[in-house]
Structures are given as structure tokens and as C-alpha cells.
Image (spheres, rainbow, N blue to C red):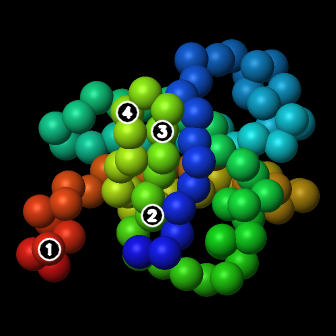
Amino acid sequence: MSTCFQALQRMPMNRAGLKRLRNSGRLPAIVFGSETENVQIHLCAKEFGRWMRTGEGGMIRLNLENHGPMVVSLEAVQRDPVTQDYLHADFIRVKEEEIAQA
């Protein structure tokens, strides 16, 4: 697992707030899992786009300010149909025990 992103937790926003966030170079995302509560985050859109272009898959380590590091897998990505910019990413949290068993 060589991919690591720095992420910041964010508050729920309306459409205009998310647009301002994207215009500042950040990608809104959410982390969810079966036994954890959902965490809304944002990360660097440029780093995420670079990672997507490499075609790497697998597990990602997200370093969150209040939650510490967590291991996630990319679940879904939303893109703008015209500009192909990334609009939103969904990550699913993976437990360390599940990685060892797989």
C-alpha cells in the first residue's frame, strides 16, 4: 500500500459550498463503512487525479487530522460529463484484519 493522501474533515455543505471547495483545488469525498460512522472529507484534487491516471488500485491510506490514519478502498467516483473533472469520491473503510485475510 504505497498510496497515501492527506485529507481534512469537512462539514456538510450545500451546492455552492462544494463548488467553492472544488474551485480551490480540493475534491469532496466521503468515507463509509459497516461499523463506523460516515466521515465527510476533502483531499487534493490534483494528487487524486494523478493517482487515477496511473491506474493503481488497491488500498489507500488516508491521513485524517482527527481520526488518524485509516485504510480505505475507492468505491465510486463522479466526474463532470463535459470537463471530465472529478466531482466527488466515495471510499469504503477497510479493517486491518480484512486486509490480512484477503
Residue 92 showing in the rendered view: no
Q: Residue at 49% of width from left, 32% of height from top? A: 65
Instruction: Give the Cα separation between the discs numbered 3 and 2.
Output: 12 Å
Q: Is residue 99 left or right of residue 5?
A: left
User: Tag 1: residue type?
Assistant: Ala
Nearer to us in this view, 34 or 6: 6
Mark 2, mark 4: which one is toward the viewer? Answer: 4
Q: Which residue is mark 2?
A: 60
User: Tag 2: residue type?
Assistant: Ile
Instruction: Give the Cα separation between the discs numbered 1 and 2.
Output: 15 Å
Instruction: Give how far across and how far down residue 92 sits, in percent.
Output: 36, 52
- Which one is earlier in the sequence, the residue at label 1 or at label 4? 4
Secondary structure type for disc 4: loop
Residue 47 showing in the rendered view: yes
At label 1, counting other C-alpha atoms closer than 10 Å, the crowd grade (few under 14, some 14-19, many 20 or more) is few
Q: Which residue is mark 4?
A: 67
Mark 3, mark 2: which one is toward the viewer? Answer: 3
| Mark identifier at residue 100 | 1
User: Tag 3: residue type?
Assistant: Leu
Secondary structure type for disc 1: helix
- Which one is earlier in the sequence, the residue at label 1 or at label 2? 2
Instruction: Give how far across and how far down residue 44 sits, in percent.
Output: 72, 49
- Which one is earlier in the sequence, the residue at label 1 or at label 3? 3
